[in-house]
Image (tube, rainbow, N blue to C red):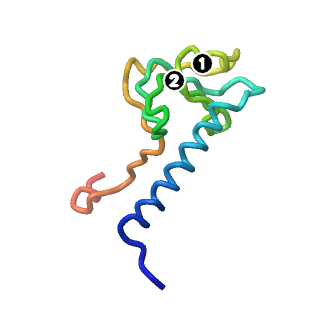
Amino acid sequence: MSARTGLGRWAGHTGVATALALCASAVNAQAPSQPADLIVTHARVITLDPARPRATAVAVRGGKFVAVGSDRDVARLRGPRTRLVDAGGRTLIRGLNDSHLHPPRGGRF
């Protein structure tokens, strides 16, 4: 066995990043058949897709992203029961969950 170092390690990380970017692109390419449960507009969306690093809106159905793009792109997924959230220019980052506790303070709450 040999350890992956240098360029080999970098290539592995690039492959993972490329796969994630392709998945994000596939979400955009799918034509949805049902309206979204939630649409967030007027946001600064960080997509982590090197080909399209920024967006302004997202649509979610069943707890999964069904569209990421401009406010206009995502508006087509609006239905009569879709919850709309105007982010007011705030930043939206996918998958950032911070659930931790500092022991000295944890007992107080």
Point out residue 43 in the picture as x, y percentages from the top left corner: 43, 23
The residue singled out by tag 2 in the image is 57
The one of 80 and 64 positioned closer to us in this rendering: 64
Choose mark 1 or mark 2, whichever is in front: 1
Residue lying farthest to the left in this orientation: 104
Separation (CA) of disc 1 from disc 2: 8 Å
Q: Nearer the viewer, residue 89 or 26?
A: 26
Q: The residue under label 1 is which amino acid type?
A: Asp
In front of the other: 55 or 84 = 55
Residue in the image at 62% along x and 39% along y: 63
Image point 67% across, 20% down: which residue? 77
Q: Earlier in the sequence, mark 1 or mark 2?
A: 2
Give me the residue at 40% from left, 26% from top: 44
Secondary structure beneath label 2: strand
SS under mark 1: helix
- Mark carried by residue 84: none
Q: Is residue 30 left or right of residue 85?
A: right
The x and y percentages for residue 12 are 48, 62
**For residue 73, which numbered disc appears in the image?**
1
Q: Amino acid at mark 2?
A: Ala
Q: Is residue 42 above or below residue 9?
A: above
Whether the residues at callouts 1 and 2 have beta carbons within 8 Å, the answer is yes
